[in-house]
Amino acid sequence: MSTLAELWSAEFSDNRAVVIPDGGPTLNYTQLEEQVTSLCQTLRRGGVGTGDPVSIVLPNCLEFLAIFLAVTQVRAVAAPLNSAYKTDEFQFYMEDAGTRAIIVPPGDHPARKAAAQLNLDVWEATLDADGTVKLTCESGEIGSAIVDDVPQDDDVALFLHTSGTTSRPKGVPLTHQNLMTSLDSIVATYQLSPDDTSLIVMPLFHVHGLLGATLSTLRSGGSVIIPPRFSAGKFWQHIQENSATWYSAVPTIHQILLARADEDDAPREGLRFIRSCSSALAPAVFSALEERFGAPVLEAYGMTEASHQMSSNPLPPGQRIPGTVGKPTGVEVVILDDAGNVLPCGRQGEVSIRGVNVMHGYRNNPEANATAFTNGYFRTGDRGRLDENNFLTLTGRLKELINRGGEKISPLEVDAVLLAHPAVAEAVSFAAPDEKYGEEVHGAVVLKQQATEEDIVAFCREHLADFKVPKKIHISDELPRTATGKIQRRHVAAKFLN
């Protein structure tokens, strides 16, 4: 089993590896490897080594990628954090990870304040004019380089937190073996090769951007384009200037690109495929993407605890089924009932998985581990069903099902109908307290053309049973999102019900 130290093959040495657009550097694999090796020596001289959690607080950039790889190669643990957090948030996540050192950009930053409170070493990351990543330990304690210590496949390489949809965030340690297994599965699923170029639009501090699009592409010998953030205005310019063949994003980003497609003179063909992951893609959006951009849309299913991908719709000529997240990729997927029994196809229950890419357990959380694993299967907390062809359909989070007078309603089903309305650009449904039924269905929408609440409710009545029709539609200019672009129902409910 290889580790991230052997992420790519020597045969790719001269291939283009990383493109930083808009005037940034372009590196081939040899140049990237040389930078990573140099950073490894710098980290070792600074005392960073086996098992040390290192919080990386950087935006999407060459510095992030090279430093992440260097941290994992010195047998330390990369613990990336969202650079938009506030000081208290940084302090919580750093304490929970057991962080020993942090890596930050130049200038004032809330992460520096949190590090000072926790008495952590601070390293500053910069990019020279010649495109070389530099690390400076601000404590100034740089010694002589220690002997190289090669990572092992059971070393923890990456430490992340769940998004905490049902509880406080839980720490997820992922080993080199977990990550490499997942990367090889992603490469196989999409037949990635040195001919592929991926435009990275998701943040690298999250498994979708880091594993689903970036490291998987490097594993295949392809190249990645890494702008500092998603920019709809520059998206197609970056695609066309660098001959990108695919991108992966959340539905929110797909919808933004669709809404602007004609205005931006977006091409009607050229991409090999479009990948969607991290939240449900409505069938109406799926169809619109394929029609407008002339590429197969492959909806996938991933989560942090599984080192990202667990299932995906296949490339053509394989069958793509809108509204499903495809077939298992590299893991065994079963549906369990509350007692842990495996249910037959067609029956709904909790989606549960088993595979080499699945974490061994949450960090310092025996209570969560006791409920998360049953007979060797990790219980995802997602409700779903498998059909006779092993395609997986997700029907909602177990904690998000709306219970209206005993009728269990999947919010994903309501979302899909709301998004099919021609005036609706974005939509999410959620449970609202109700004196008569216990819970009622509400919806929140962002419009792309004129419509009234009554129009949208009437449309829903045409497509949903009466008990599923939203009692109220909240029309808004925007929906609250997490840093990775996800729309979490509890945040939407809090915004519109308070």
Image: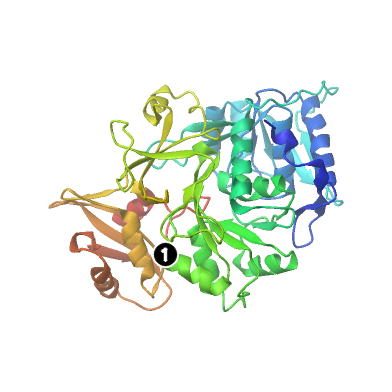
For the N terminus, the quadrant is top right
60, 187: nearer the viewer: 187
396, 114: nearer the viewer: 396
- Amino acid of disc 1: Pro
237, 360: nearer the viewer: 360
Is 135 above or below relative to 45? below
* Residue 268 position within the rendered picture, expressed as x and y whole percent measured from the top left: 60, 75
* Residue 69 position within the rendered picture, expressed as x and y whole percent measured from the top left: 72, 38
Left or right: 107, with 463 as reference point: right
* Residue 479 position within the rendered picture, expressed as x and y whole percent measured from the top left: 42, 60
Number of marks drawn:
1
* Residue 86 position within the rendered picture, expressed as x and y whole percent measured from the top left: 54, 42
Is 148 above or below relative to 329? above
- Secondary structure of the residue carrying numbered label 1: helix
As drawn, the residue found furthest toward the left would be: 436
Is 49 above or below relative to 487? above
**Quadrant position of residue 65:** top right
**How many residues crowd mark 1 within 10 Å: few (<14), some (14–19), many (20+)?**
some
Q: Is residue 123 visible?
A: no
Q: Is residue 486 visible?
A: yes
381, 14: nearer the viewer: 14
Point 68% across, 50% down: residue? 217
Left or right: 45, with 473 as reference point: right
Point 41% across, 62% down: residue? 282
Q: How are the residues colored?
A: rainbow
Left or right: 242, with 285 as reference point: right
Point 64% across, 48% down: residue? 187
> Disc 1 marks which residue?
283
